[in-house]
């Protein structure tokens, strides 16, 4: 079993890692940590460096608990939602864990929601953490 964790290194990220560790131990699963950027002018070198550092810290937390973990920084010209769904399908992930933000109704309409996209398009169960 593989668990995909959509990781951005935020405060919610700690909760995502904690839940992923619980699920990985309970289901004898591997963890795939994923961060996605659109690339091109929309992604800065600093963002990539910070994302790589955050992924490595999260990976260490999980591997220190004996959980097989891989980290992936995706910069493929897709939206984060598209990247997550594509990665989950390409890697036969059995579960996706994603953080959600509280937003106003107008904010959701104007800016969309990666979590909403993932929940609606995923072929596997999605666990959201707030």
Image (cartoon, rainbow, N blue to C red):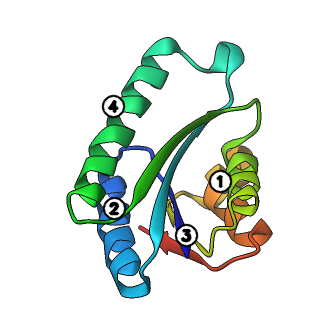
33 and 63: which is toward the camera: 63
Q: Closer to the N terminus: mark 4 or mark 2?
A: 2
Q: What's the CA distance linking mark 3 and mark 1? A: 20 Å
From the top left corner, tell me how far across and down residue 47 is, in percent: 46, 23
Is residue 44 shown to the viewer in this render? yes
Q: Are marks 3 and 4 in contact (CB under 8 Å)?
A: no
Q: Residue at x 75, y 62 (%)?
A: 89
- Measured in 3D between alpha carbons, the distance from the residue under mark 3 to the one under mark 4, in whole angstroms, is 22 Å
Quarter residue 9 falls in: top left
Residue 12 lies, in percent from the top left, at: 35, 57
The residue labelled by disc 2 is 17
The relative height of residue 126 versus residue 5 in the rendered view (above or below) is below
Q: What residue is at 36 percent from the left and 54 percent from the top?
A: 13
Give the mark nearest the N terminus, 3 or 4.
Answer: 3
Q: CA distance from mark 4 to mark 2?
A: 15 Å
The residue wearing badge 4 is 53
Q: Which dot marks residue 2?
A: 3
- Rounded to the nearest angstrom, the CA distance separating label 4 from label 1 is 22 Å
């Amino acid at each position: 079993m593989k668990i995909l964790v959509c990781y951005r290194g935020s405060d919610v990220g700690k909760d995502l890692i904690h839940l992923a560790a619980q699920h990985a131990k309970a289901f004898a699963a591997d963890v795939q940590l994923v961060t996605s950027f659109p690339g091109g002018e929309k992604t800065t070198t600093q963002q990539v460096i910070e994302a790589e550092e955050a992924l490595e810290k999260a990976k260490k937390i999980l591997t220190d608990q004996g959980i097989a973990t891989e980290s992936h920084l995706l910069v493929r010209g897709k939206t984060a939602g598209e990247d997550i769904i594509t990665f989950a399908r390409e890697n036969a992930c059995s579960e996706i864990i994603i953080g959600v933000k509280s937003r106003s109704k107008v904010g959701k309409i104007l800016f969309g929601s990666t979590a909403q996209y993932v929940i609606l398009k995923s072929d596997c169960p999605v666990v959201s953490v707030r």
